[in-house]
Image: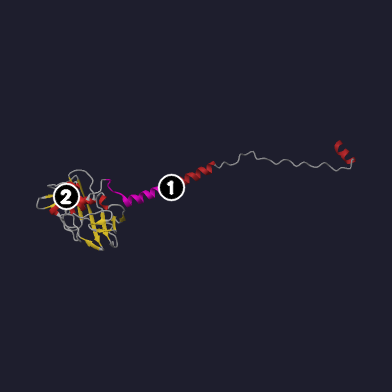
Amino acid sequence: MAKRSARKKAGLGPPPRRTPPPVRSTGAPRPRTLDRRWLIAGVVAVLAVVGIVLGVVLTRGSASASNAAPIEWGSIPGLQTGPPPWDSSSAVLPDRLSILGLSALSAEGEVIHIHQHLDVYVNGKKATVPALVGIDEGAQFLTQLHTHDTTGIVHVESPTKRSFRLGEFFGEWGVRLTANCISNYCGNLHWWVNGVKMTGNPAQLMLKAHQEIVIASGKPPFPIPSSYKFPAGL
């Protein structure tokens, strides 16, 4: 009160009011670490899904390929170099077996007993897969890979458990098969397994039960066969 009276006698007004200091929040600022963790977790999850999808696609497109050394076609005697149809080439079969790692059997093996269907096209026309590929009637033997008729059904019947490649069948048939060529037709080769477009060397394809295999040099068929109705028991 004394201070106010003194200011009043001196002709001064009331003292200015002091502005209170701003109230500071006692709460800590919201950390961003948690948000970043969620962001990183989301990115990792997306990348994992993409990796799985790519793995499935790549597996479908190049799977079942053997890591065995490619077939040395120049060492196989009597390759058929003319236009289709190509015969069974059974007369030269005995000379090819050791090169291909196949055996002369007196009866069909039973340890492995599976079948595939093979379609071959050259310049838009279907080439017949002949009967008796892998069978020598004169010498009365057959190999682990053979045909009985012209349906295109390949029989894999082995007395021992091992893997077989499509190129081994083409080798005993006497028809060269590489990533670019079938016989002497080169430069525009395509192939499919169960309707899926494949890449790489078809000769390296490992044979599995009920595959529908399409090899086309030049114009492919339309539509691409994706399955085959095997007879009962095959």
Q: Which residues are magenta?
A: 46-67
Please say whether residue 38 is visible from this viewpoint: yes
Looking at the magenta stretch, what is its main secondary structure? helix
Where is residue 205? Give x, y as percent: 26, 50
The magenta stretch spans residue 51: yes
Callout 1–callout 2 Cβ contact below 8 Å:
no
Task: Look at the picture and state if 77 lies above or below 85.
Answer: above
Task: Look at the picture and state if 230 lies above or below 16.
Answer: below
Where is residue 181? Give x, y as percent: 26, 56
> Within the image, what quadrant is residue 212 found in?
bottom left
Q: What element does badge 2 sit on?
A: helix
In the displayed image of the protein, which residue is found farthest to the front?
Answer: 74
In the displayed image of the protein, which residue is found farthest to the right?
Answer: 9
Nearer the observer, disc 1 or disc 2? 2
User: Residue 96 got which mark?
Assistant: 2
Residue at image mark 1 = 47
The residue at the point 23 percent across, 51 percent down is: 167
63 to the left or right of 76: right
- What amino acid is labelled 1 in the image? Leu
Q: What element does badge 1 sit on?
A: helix
In the displayed image of the protein, which residue is found farthest to the top?
Answer: 2
106 to the left or right of 40: left
Where is residue 234? Give x, y as percent: 20, 52
Mark before the other along the chain sequence, 1 or 2: 1
The residue at the point 43 percent across, 47 percent down is: 47
